[in-house]
Image (tube, rainbow, N blue to C red):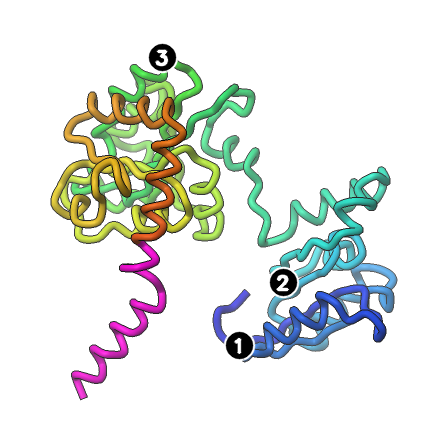
Amino acid sequence: MRRGPGALLSAASCSPHWPGAANRSQDHLEAVGHICSLKDAFGYENPSEIANLISAEKFEAALAIHLYKGGRLLQGSRIPFGIIFGGTDINEDIKHEEKHRVMGAVLEEASATFNWKRFLQNAGIPQDTENLHLFLLICGLRRVKDPLYLVDVFSEWHRREPHIHLLIIGPAVSCFFCFRNCPNYAPFTSRAPGVHLLQEIPQDDLHAAVKRCFAVVNSSISEGMSAAILEAMDLDVPVLARNIPGNAAIIQHKDTGLLYTDPQEFVQLSKSLMNDPTLEREIVTKAKAYVKKHHSWDCEREAYQNLVLRLQ
């Protein structure tokens, strides 16, 4: 769905006597400049009718209210669509085999759905791992990010505790880390069990993955203000970052995150975090508050606006 105004289709079961979520969602979308067309799902028999409507009206995205009632009509849609769950689909429709099957198929197609199992499969992480603890390192693969810094110690840790995995996500922005054509690619594969490499993925999927991981990791040699760290804080995920000035400027050790000075300390701190749920909750809560106070969207917008005003 576009960030700016666009033509949106909303498919829902509508009643003039019970406007409910359909009309509220339309009001919310139009309030930010979208052109929203609300259609009653009961007025259409199959997805081809909705496809014709989408083509004729040139809709750019769609929302369906109720996974079965509205969502089934968007199957095979040529535009991105999302689903707003209701009560009936979750509590009743799921009990019926055919409706359950259709609902599952719709979710597979919905743009707003993150498939955790598929994500693990693409990353090469065994899906049957019990008590999976996934650490996420998000960075462009270049020297200053030092993505190999924790590989050896992490692989050694994984051999002792197979449920521990490190996933490095990011594009190769330096020829030093070119995929498959460089000896330095090998540590991510056969020589380093428990360490996985995945090329960049859409931002929404990345944020969904961050929420499902145990912690976000930073191993950079130098940082200004890491967006990955701040986003993890905002998403209620603990951060373990290399103790360098840029990271220490936004992380207070054992308060809003954990700072390590070498790979061995990284493992030590990770284990303490895994074994102390209270510490994890405190770090996550304080980090969220820190981001809200110092790095919120509103604060950033105001700073840019003030900068432009000073330039005039």
Q: State whether the magenta stretch is mostly helix, strand or loop.
A: helix
Report the front residue among 200 and 185.
200
Q: Nearer the viewer, mark 1 or mark 3?
A: 1
> Please, is residue 166 above or below residue 155 in the view?
below
Q: What's under tag 3, amino acid-wise?
A: Arg
Mark 2 or mark 3: whose residue is earlier in sequence: 2
Q: Is residue 49 left or right of residue 147?
A: right
Q: Are marks 1 and 3 in contact (CB under 8 Å)?
A: no
Q: Is residue 61 left or right of residue 201?
A: right
Q: What's under tag 1, amino acid-wise?
A: Val
Q: Are marks 2 and 3 in contact (CB under 8 Å)?
A: no
The residue shown at (55%, 21%) is 128
> Please, is residue 172 above or below residue 78 in the view?
above
Q: Which mark is residue 265?
A: none
Q: Nearer the viewer, mark 1 or mark 2?
A: 1
Q: What's under tag 2, amino acid-wise?
A: Ile
The residue shown at (84%, 75%) is 16
Report the front residue among 181 and 98.
98
Write the start and end of the magenta stretch as one range.
291-312
SS under mark 3: helix
Quickly name the residue at label 3.
Answer: 159
Quickly name the residue at label 2.
Answer: 79
Q: Quadrant of residue 8?
A: bottom right
Q: Quadrant of residue 177?
A: top left
> Please, is residue 264 above or below residue 148 in the view?
above
Quickly name the residue at label 1.
Answer: 32
Marks 2 and 3, how far apart at CA = 45 Å
Q: Quadrant of the C terminus?
A: bottom left
**Magenta run includes residue 308:** yes
